Amino acid sequence: MKLTAIALSKVNTPAVRRELSGILQCTEQTIIRYIRKNEHNGPLTTLGAMEQIRKMTRLTYEEIIERGIVRKTALAERNKKAG
C-alpha cells in the first residue's frame, strides 16, 4: 500500500507531520523523508499513522491508500515465483 497524491499533499503540513512523528516515534525530518519516498507498506501505512492521517485530514481510507498498486505488485511477485 502507498499513500495517494491527495493524502501526501494533506500530510505534508507541519501540524500533521508533528503528530505523525509522535506516533511513529521519529523526527519530523524522518516524516518528510517518508512522504518523499512513499514506499509500499512504509511507515505511513501503519494502522496508527493511517488513523491519525484520517483524523487530521478528514480523508477516508479509500482516499488515503492506493490499493490497485498493491494488487499489481502482489501479482507480479506471485508470477515470478510461479515462473
Image: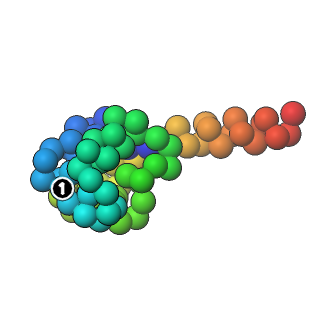
Which residue in the structure is indicated by mark 1? 18
Answer above or below: position of 4 versus 54. above
| Residue at figure coordinates x 52%, y 38% from the top left | 69
Q: Is residue 83 left or right of residue 13?
A: right
Image quadrant occupied by the C terminus? top right
Residue under the image location 29 percent in, 47 percent down: 31
Residue at the spot x=34%, y=61% of the render? 24
Q: Position of residue 48 (x, y in %)?
A: 35, 66
Residue 79 % position (x, y): 78, 36
Residue 36 visible in the shown view: yes
Q: How many marks?
A: 1
Q: Residue at x 31, y 47 (%)?
A: 30
Label 1 Cα crowd, 10 Å radius (few <14 / some 14-19 / many 20+): some
- Residue 54 visible in rendering: no
Q: Quadrant of residue 25?
A: bottom left
Question: Can you say whether 51 is above or below 70 in the image?
Answer: below
Q: Is residue 81 left or right of residue 38?
A: right
Helix, strand or loop under label 1: helix
Looking at the image, the residue that sits furthest to the right is: 83
Q: Within the image, what quadrant is residue 61 found in?
A: bottom left
Query: Residue flagged by tag 1: what amino acid is it?
Result: Arg
Q: How is the image coloured?
A: rainbow
Q: Nearer the viewer, residue 24 or 61?
A: 24
> Percent from the top left, x then y, of residue 35?
32, 40
Image check: 3 left or right of 7?
right
Residue 76, horizontal then vertical, whole percent: 70, 35
Q: Is residue 33 left or right of residue 2?
A: left
Depicted 52 relative to depicted 8: above or below: below
